[in-house]
């Protein structure tokens, strides 16, 4: 009766982090990962507001540039890595993340990397190991957990 089932498969993945300060947190993670914050085109933003497709309340100024208030994104310098979007939400983080990032730096670089991230504003939460694997769980400046392994 029916034809073959057509299955749609995602061709790209984006990681979204809910937060109170998308632009500040994007800056922090860009520094932590060595990635770049995606530029936002001020002329597009101004045009959307002028055309009535957006309001002034939907914009903000960050580091002297007009940006969309609701989000900021990062891209890796290496192709094929997922984009990370920091998205404004009204509620504060209240419980442990169900999904988190793991930063794999290797055993010999783990302690210097943890020290660098803590000096940049992360908080060390705990250390753990399983068999030959060990990691340090940290929280970013808004409390989002991540691991350094």
Image (cartoon, rainbow, N blue to C red):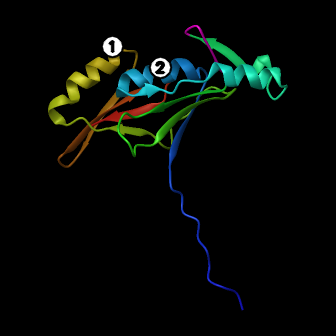
Determine the main secondary structure of the stretch shown in magenta. Answer: strand
| Residue of label 1 | 119
**Quadrant containing the C terminus in the rendered view:** top left
Relative to residue 33, is residue 143 drawn left or right? right
Relative to residue 149, is residue 57 drawn left or right? right
Give the residue at x 66% y 26%. Answer: 70
The tag on residue 27 is: 2
Of residues 31 and 18, the one nearer the viewer is 31
> Residue extending furthest left?
108
Give the residue at x 48% y 43%. Answer: 99
Task: State which quadrant residue 116 falls in.
Answer: top left
In x, y percent, where is residue 16?
55, 38
Disc 2 is placed on an element classified as helix
**Front tag of 2 and 1:** 2
Res 54 seen here? yes
Give the residue at x 17% y 47%. Answer: 132
Relative to residue 120, is residue 67 drawn left or right? right
**Quadrant containing the N terminus in the rendered view:** bottom right
Give the magenta-colored segment's residue range. 63-68
Answer above or below: position of 95 versus 12. Answer: above
């Amino acid at each position: 009766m029916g034809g073959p089932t057509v299955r749609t498969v995602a061709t790209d993945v984006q990681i979204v982090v809910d937060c109170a300060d998308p632009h500040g947190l994007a800056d922090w993670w860009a520094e932590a990962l060595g990635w770049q914050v995606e530029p936002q085109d001020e002329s597009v933003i101004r045009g959307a507001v002028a055309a009535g497709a957006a309001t002034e309340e939907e914009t903000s100024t960050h580091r002297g540039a007009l940006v969309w208030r609701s989000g900021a994104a990062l891209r890796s310098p290496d192709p094929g890595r997922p984009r990370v979007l920091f998205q404004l939400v009204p509620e504060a983080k209240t419980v442990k993340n169900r999904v988190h990032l793991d930063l794999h730096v290797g055993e010999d670089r783990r302690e210097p990397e943890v020290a660098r991230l803590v000096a940049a504003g992360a908080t060390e939460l705990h250390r753990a190991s399983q068999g030959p694997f060990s990691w340090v769980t940290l929280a970013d400046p808004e409390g989002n957990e991540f691991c350094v392994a």
